[in-house]
Amino acid sequence: MLDLTKAAAQADTMIHRLRDGRAERRAHLDTALDQIKKSEATFESLKHKIAASKPIWLTAGLIEPPARRLPAPPAPSNHTILATDGSHIDVDRHQSARCYLINIGRVRLDYGQEARAELTSIPKLCADKDEMVLSDGLREQAVEGTLLGVKRAVAELDHLAEMSREVEPVRPTLALTDGSLIMWGLANERYPDFVSKKLLENSYLKTMDEIYRLAKDNHLTLASYISFPRTTDVVNALRLLLCPNTIADCERHCQNVPGFKRPCETIAGVHDSDIFECLLAVGERSAIFYNQSQIIKRYGPHHVYFFYLKLAGEVARIEVPEWIASDPEKLSQTHALIWDQCQRGDGYPVALAEAHEQAVVTGTDRANFQQMLEHWLITEHLPQTTSAKSQSKRARWV
């Protein structure tokens, strides 16, 4: 049981520390804002320095001056928004019935003439061996935890592709998903190569190929929406402006230098969203940047680009594939339709909010799902075993 009285005493110390650090954070932000304004004049040299350097942090790739600002174009009166979101019930290792459930919320909103809304959720219960494990014939990897989250992201994109096929080619359409287009779950974990090949190359990117083919022949665009991002890709690029070395090599030049003496530390702790909160007006988007993480090298023509969009209450990060970022008309349509959605949704895209409501699995849903599994086992006279730990949680001993 949580003792809030003891936790409150510790929280008071945390609040004092945050308050004492406000002046330093403001100074770091001011320095970052100065650097992004200076980058207009040093744009080409900064691009070359980013390409040649070896920083220890993930740095945004530049294709236009970072301080660029663009107002939102008007949204077409007749358009369609497609959105998916997902949730899941993970494998319970304390139960004998090995299975998991993925629930995908799907939304289609048609605006203008013949306006309509379609909202639904599609659950999928997975229990077959080929669903429970990934295999290359010799090795097996269980689909649970992080990998189940990756598989859910694959399912979300699959449903977006399916809905995209049903939209009239001449109708401006935005296919929108929540979270990143980058499979960070595969980038940050050490899985065997066959795992990422099955989930990324053979699944996720093949679906991206299909959406790309659809987009070439109609007015379809694809984007992901990240609310309240904590990313620092652009800030990390600005760190290179502060680095006195012609080529930044952090491990070589600064490994033995105390953090507070490194010139780039004068913008430490600043997030990209902090900069664009100050730089942009409401409705404006930032310049386009591209991601340089290792996993992106496997994305081929679907290399992930991003921009920041200022809303009334926050700065959102919008990610798009390269074939959107390189097409001014499609990029403009993406900006216009996301901004329109956020205005309709009090700062958050209506379609994503509705997709989340369709997808969400509550605590009660999870309990009912578990009871349903137990009922099936009993009805079919199948063995129903649970771990001692699971049983102990259901009983109070003191």
Image: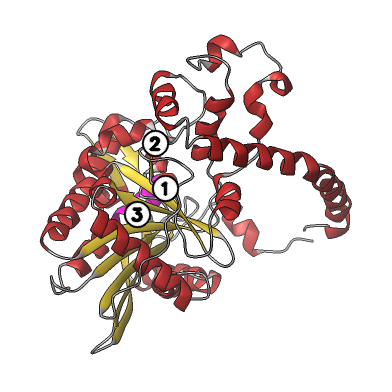
Between residue 70 and residue 234, name the one nearer to us: 70
User: Which three-letter amino acid code belongs to the residue tagged 3?
Assistant: Ala
Look at the image and tell me whether residue 157 can be seen.
no
Q: Position of residue 115 (x, y in %)?
A: 28, 87
Tag on residue 62? 2
Q: Secondary structure at mark 2?
A: strand
Between residue 51 and residue 147, name the one nearer to us: 51
149 within the magenta span: yes
Specify which label sits upstream in the sequence, 1 or 3.
3
**How far is disc 1 from disc 3 in space, using C-alphas?**
27 Å
Task: Tell whether 64 sits left or right of 175.
Answer: right
395 within the magenta span: no
**Residue beneath the point at 43% across and 62% down:** 71
Between residue 100 and residue 114, name the one nearer to us: 114
259 in relation to 363, above or below? above
Q: Position of residue 239 (x, y in %)?
A: 56, 29
Q: Which residue was labeled with disc 3?
A: 153
Q: Please identify the quarter of the rendering in which residue 102 is found.
A: bottom left
Are discs 2 and 3 less than 8 Å apart at CB? Answer: no
User: Which three-letter amino acid code belongs to the residue tagged 1?
Assistant: Ala
